Image (cartoon, rainbow, N blue to C red):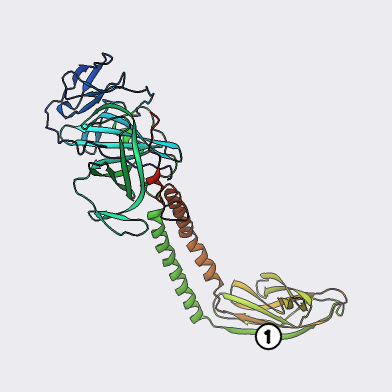
Amino acid sequence: MAGEMSTPPNPAAGGKPPRPRPATVPKATALNCPKCGSAIVLRTFSNAVNVVCESCHAILDASDPKLKILEEARKRLDITPLIPLGTRGLWKGHTYEVVGFQSRAINSDGVNYYWFEYLLYNPYAGYRYLTEYNGHWNDVTVCHTLPTPGNAGIKPQMRLGDRSFTHFQTAKAFTTFILGEFPWQVRLNDKVEARDYIAPPFILSSESTPEETTWSMGEYVASSEIRDAFKLKADLPSPMGVYSDQPNPFGDDSGHFWRRGWTFVIVALFLVIGTWVMAKRETVYSENYHYKQGEQAEASFVTPEFDLGGHTSNVIVETNTDVSNDWVYIHYSLVNTDTDVAYDFGREISYYSGSDSDGSWTEGDWKDKAIVASVPPGKYYLRVEPEKDPGSQPVNYHITVHRDMPTTWFFFIAAGLLLLPPLFISMRSAAFEGQRWSESDYAGASGDSSGGDDSDDSSDD
């Protein structure tokens, strides 16, 4: 079982806490610990079933006027709650007071993984919990409606209301440290079987003992909200890793990016179709040539003028040769006769073939196509300068010039660029989910692991 622990939202063994009676001006009741004599403050009055001395950590019976000792601390642990007992804060529209604190754990592969629970109380709104693990917080309340089973596949599901939750982890949890007061019987090393089902940012949890099963609902909250609500002076620890019901920061955006990306791709596709339909496809020049290295004193020459009419468009220069196991390099300049603006480009054309032990092979091509984009209308000519190795075979080649030809290459480049952002977001989202589920019962290739059921449930107490 992975290191993520179950988010325990409810009384481990005592069932649902009783609904408190309203009080107009709540006042804490002060008593003394029969073990060490330290002052004991009861903040929830008759709702308290157990109270833990903050000095000696003895567990006391709050219903007994003499605070009968139910269990003495076996050893003293130095755990300081991030939200001190007695702290009050405005949370979910009510003023809550922190009245209880627990440290709980699961054991995986011989290692204990701890989380902390803060029991909140308001005399009108009742109880709720804040749980914290590695800087991740959840606001938890007890369910008053039982969930129903959903899909029973590799990852079973539960439904509550209109929301479906996927099984994340099953683990045996035990209590390692207690402070404050609780409306149920609480003991060190209390054990429950906890099952978590997630629908981020929500988590549905059950805790089972031989006597009963209780359900609770948690919602992931930012630590800054808790700090501000309870007016804590220090910042709370930053989250580490990915928590089971932590919202995927890329999940909601990926669908939006994909929809927008595909919208732009469709627009680009219609533009391609439009240019394809409207293209003139004119051939404005075509001629055969012959070249042999050293045959002419000046290898370069210019073609006759040709007219590029109409609107600004692309120009395609095709070169077809008869090279075989040879190459030729041709430098072109497309020159406007009126403005002397030149478009320079060079093309190397090579073609080789043969055979070996693996069979016949070819490399290169004997033809080439160069595209000059956005050429204004006007009269033009080509300056042509071929080049070959001295002593090589002569080459025959044919030059054809087209204007306003439909092209599709820009569409594929544009489509790739438009789909890069959603692809990047989706990869980040998948990586986040992979990290989340690596902490579940379904980590690894098996997909149906339930290692939490076999965890060692011994505590370190």
Q: Is residue 424 above or below residue 203?
A: below
Q: Position of residue 296 (x, y in %)?
A: 85, 79
Left-right relation of 301 to 175: right
Name the residue rendered at 22%, 45% in the picture.
Answer: 143
Compare residues 215 and 70 and report the one nearer the observer.
Answer: 70
Question: Which corner quadrant holds the N terminus?
Answer: top left
Q: Position of residue 47 (x, y in %)?
A: 16, 30
Name the residue rendered at 44%, 42% in the picture.
Answer: 241
Left-right relation of 372 to 116: right
Q: Is residue 452 above or below residue 366?
A: above
Left-right relation of 407 to 421: right
Question: Which corner quadrant holds the C terminus?
Answer: top left
Left-right relation of 111 to 197: right
Q: Is residue 298 above or below residue 101?
A: below
Compare residues 420 and 378 and report the one nearer the observer.
Answer: 420
Residue 374, quarter of picture: bottom right
